[in-house]
Structure formats: C-alpha cells, structure tokens
Image (tube, rainbow, N blue to C red):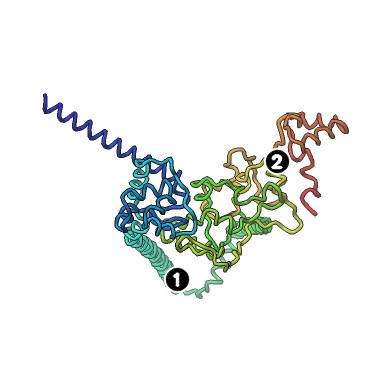
C-alpha cells in the first residue's frame, strides 16, 4: 500500500512540475510577444540586440548581480549603477522602453522561453543535406522516367516501320506470284480512297467543320489572359502576409477606397514591418535583402538608412485597354465589393498576383456565378446583369449615393422604379450598368 502511495505522490509531483513548466513557457511566450517582439528577436539583432542566452552574456561580461532585471525595469537606473549596463546602453541610439511592471519571475519566464527557441539557421543547415538529396532523387527519378518514355516511343516507331516493311514485302511477293505490276504507295492510297469515297467525303466534311469551329474559337480567345502571372522583381507571398499574418489588403493598397486604382505599395510600407522581420531562413533573408536594397536600408547593428535606394519595377498584372474605364473606389466603397470577389482569396494565394480564372472566382463566398473569362467585357456585363444592389427598395440600403437615385426614380419615373422591383431586387444593369459611356470613353 505504501509503495502504491509513493508512486501516486511521485506521479502527482511530476504532473505538477510539467504543468508549471508548460505554464511558464506559455507565460514567457505571451510576455515576449507583448513586450519585446517589437524590437528584439531570439537569434538575430534588430532594433535591439538578440536575446538568446542574454543572462549568461551579462554574467560573463561582469554585470552586477540582478543588474539585468533592473535594466528591464528601468534601463537608465541600471546604466547609472552598473558599468556593464552603461556599455550596453551605447549599443543602439534607440532608447529602450522601460517595463517597471514586470516582476523578476516574469522576466525569467521571458528569458527561459527565448533560450528554449532553436536557431532557424541551425535547423536549415541540419536539414539542408537531406532536402537537397531528396530533391536530387526526385529530379533523377523524373529524368529517368522521361528517358523511359522516349525509349518506348523509339521502340514503337521501329516496330511500326518493321511491320510496314514486312507487309510491303509480303504484298510484293503476292504481286510477283500473280505476275502483276507492283503499285507505289501513292497508287495504293488513291485506289483505297476511290473504293471508300463515301466514307472519305463524310469524314472530310467533319474535319473541315471542326477546323472552322476551332479557328473561330481561337479568334474568340484573343486578348483573354486567364491565369496570367508575369514574373516580379521581388517575391511577395500573399498567403503569408494576408493569411498567416492577417494584414488587411487596404494597409498596402491604401488608395483603393479613394482612387480609381488600388495603388502599388511603396517600399516604405514594406519597411514598416521588415525593419524587424528579416527572415527566419537564409532563403528568406536573401529575398528580403532585395527590399532592403530598394529602401537603402543597412540591417547591421540597430539598422540605418544609407540614402542609396533602388526603385522596384513591378510588372503589371491586370491590364485593361486604354478605352476602358474602371474605378476601384466606386466598386469598393459604393458597391461594397470585397477584394477577393475579383482578385480571388489572397489568403490562400502564394503568388504575388495573377489573373484568377472565373472558375476559381465562382467558388468565393458571396460571388455571383459567372461564365465569361475574367477581365473580358462579357465578364463585366454578366456581373452587372446579375449583381444585386439591394434586395427591395433602394432607401433600405442607407447609402447617400443610392438614396439620391431612389429619390430621382420616385420623383421622375415611379412606374420604372416599380418595374425594377417586380423581381424583388435591383441590379447594376437596371441603374445604368449597361450604358456604354459608363465604362468606355
């Protein structure tokens, strides 16, 4: 019985210890993100120095006992009392925020969490060889598979040629046996076609009609660029920025609510985040260097601007003819459209930008189901014919633009307004969305 009690007590103490450990880890994670992440990273210098094993660094540097905790609470007081803290204060011209509310246990929880974080560069270095080997094996397998198909194709061609030659020889032997003149391939073909002229005529007609249909369909595809995706000077994965990090489209494309264009974000907008976010892997760091080069930013130490900038030349994705007018603000503000209704769900799109096919747009919640290719006139016309402005009378939309249209219809043509409401909805087409001058100069 006592042995059993001892076992249960040991198990309970173990559970309590693990629960305390996990709780401290969670507390350190939350405190770091709330207090420190703006300026510090575990394994990389930012506005402030990296924090990995910072307590050991201070201890080895000769800092007074407890000085690092005083530094977090009030760095100026610590710098005045400890020479090592004074030397740390000269690391960056940016003054550190004081956190007098943090207790010693909370500061330790932050440092414990930081020290438990693995170095991304070490992880990449350890996994690089395996990843490279796997990639090489995949490429080798794909290459060998391609050669197999090529060899099979050659063997098939040789077999066909051999069978044709044997057939030819056998027919020549039969001709010699019958003492008749041998026919050439052309003569054989003409003879066969003459004996099967009805079939040749029927299938010939089908072939001509099919070619005409394919030609007309090809003419109709001119200028249609569904799934078009040009290369860009800097990679921008939308799924990371809008999906994982939850950045609103309007933060980067800030003119979409007040201009006909959505606007391309300037490199200064990028630097609002990337002063601190320089990448977790060597591959990411290499890509973000292009942003630093464009902004003229030197990330060494606390970071500083060099004044030597390099403009980014983005390749335009959504290209409309010069005679076509489209206003983003009218559709976003007045029409109340979400960006994803025309551009697709950017939280799942790895590409910088592309013309999303209509089949993908039809799967977006709230979208009208359309059949015409994206960015064509038929696509716009079809949307204006089906898209509802409001279910019921326009005065229920509570919008100044539509309130004015509601008043004009009631005062000038009440019968027309009643006709619009027969189906219980008002579409863009019914309010002039099909007028040529709305979209064409």
Q: Could you say where residue 54 lies in the image, as x and y percent from the top left?
A: 35, 53
Does 121 appear above or below 34? below
Separation of disc 2 and disc 1 at Cα?
74 Å
- Indicate the secondary structure of the residue bearing disc 1: helix
Does 164 appear above or below 11? below
Horizontal arrangement in the rendering, residue 147 relative to residue 392 (left or right): left
Q: Nearer the viewer, residue 383 or 276?
A: 276
- Indicate the secondary structure of the residue bearing disc 2: loop
- Which residue lies under the disc numbered 2? 335
**Residue occupying image coordinates x 60% and y 51%:** 252
> Reading the chain from its start, which is encountered first: label 2 or label 1?
1
- Which residue lies under the disc numbered 1? 168
Q: In the rendered picture of this protein, how many numbered marks are placed on residues?
A: 2
In the rendered structure, find residue 58 and report the number of the disc placed on it: none
The image quadrant of residue 397 is top right
**Residue occupying image coordinates x 37% and y 61%:** 135
Quadrant where the N terminus lies? top left
Does 12 appear above or below 197? above
Q: Could you say where residue 19 lies in the image, as x and y percent from the top left?
A: 30, 35
Which residue, as the protein is rendered here, is positioned at the far right? Answer: 412
Q: Could you say where residue 152 lies in the image, as x and y percent from the top left?
A: 39, 64
**Residue occupying image coordinates x 80% and y 54%:** 441
Horizontal arrangement in the rendering, residue 31 relative to residue 333 (left or right): left
Within 10 Å of disc 1 (Cα), the crowding (few <14, some 14-19, many 20+) is few
Does 8 appear above or below 294? above
Q: Could you say where residue 196 lies in the image, as x and y percent from the top left?
A: 58, 60
Q: Nearer the viewer, residue 347 or 290?
A: 290
Q: Nearer the viewer, residue 50 or 253?
A: 50
The image quadrant of residue 21 is top left
The image quadrant of residue 15 is top left
Residue 311 visible here = yes
């Amino acid at each position: 019985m006592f042995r059993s009690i001892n076992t249960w007590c040991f198990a309970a103490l173990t559970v309590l210890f693990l629960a305390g450990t996990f709780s401290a880890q969670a507390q350190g994670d939350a405190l770091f993100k709330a207090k420190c992440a703006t300026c510090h990273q575990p394994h990389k210098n930012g506005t402030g120095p990296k924090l990995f094993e910072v307590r050991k660094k201070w201890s080895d540097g000769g800092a007074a006992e407890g000085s690092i905790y005083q530094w977090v609470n009030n760095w100026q007081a610590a710098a005045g009392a400890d020479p090592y803290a004074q030397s740390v204060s000269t690391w960056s011209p940016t003054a550190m925020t004081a956190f007098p509310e943090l207790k010693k246990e909370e500061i330790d929880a932050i440092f414990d969490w930081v020290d438990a974080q693995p170095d991304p560069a070490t992880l990449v270095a350890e996994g690089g060889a395996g990843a490279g080997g796997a990639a090489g094996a995949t490429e080798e397998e794909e290459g060998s598979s391609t050669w197999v198909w090529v060899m099979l194709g050659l063997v098939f061609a040789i077999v066909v040629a051999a069978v044709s030659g044997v057939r030819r020889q056998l027919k020549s032997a039969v001709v010699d046996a019958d003492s008749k003149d041998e026919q050439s391939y052309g003569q054989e073909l003409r003879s066969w076609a003459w004996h099967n002229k009805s079939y040749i005529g029927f299938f010939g007609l089908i072939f001509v009609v099919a070619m005409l249909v394919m030609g007309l369909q090809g003419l109709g595809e001119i200028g249609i660029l569904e799934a078009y995706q040009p290369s860009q000077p800097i990679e921008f994965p939308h799924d990371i920025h809008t999906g994982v990090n939850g950045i609103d489209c309007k933060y980067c494309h800030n003119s979409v609510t007040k201009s006909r264009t959505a606007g391309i974000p300037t490199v200064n907008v990028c630097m609002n985040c990337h002063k601190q976010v320089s990448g977790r892997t060597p591959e990411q760091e290499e890509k973000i260097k292009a942003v630093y080069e464009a902004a003229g930013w030197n990330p060494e130490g606390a970071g500083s601007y060099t004044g030597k900038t390099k403009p980014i030349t983005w390749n335009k994705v959504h290209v409309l003819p010069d005679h076509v007018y489209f206003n983003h603000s009218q559709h976003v503000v007045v029409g109340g459209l979400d960006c994803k209704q025309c551009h697709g769900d950017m939280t799942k799109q790895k590409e910088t930008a592309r013309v999303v096919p209509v089949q993908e747009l039809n799967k977006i919640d709230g979208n009208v189901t359309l059949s015409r290719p994206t960015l064509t006139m038929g696509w716009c016309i079809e949307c204006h014919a089906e898209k509802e402005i409001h279910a019921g009378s326009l005065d229920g939309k509570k919008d100044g633009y539509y309130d004015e249209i509601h008043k004009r219809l009631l005062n000038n043509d009440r019968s027309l307004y009643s006709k619009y409401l027969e189906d219980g909805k008002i579409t863009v087409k019914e309010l002039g969305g099909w007028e040529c001058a709305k979209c064409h100069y």
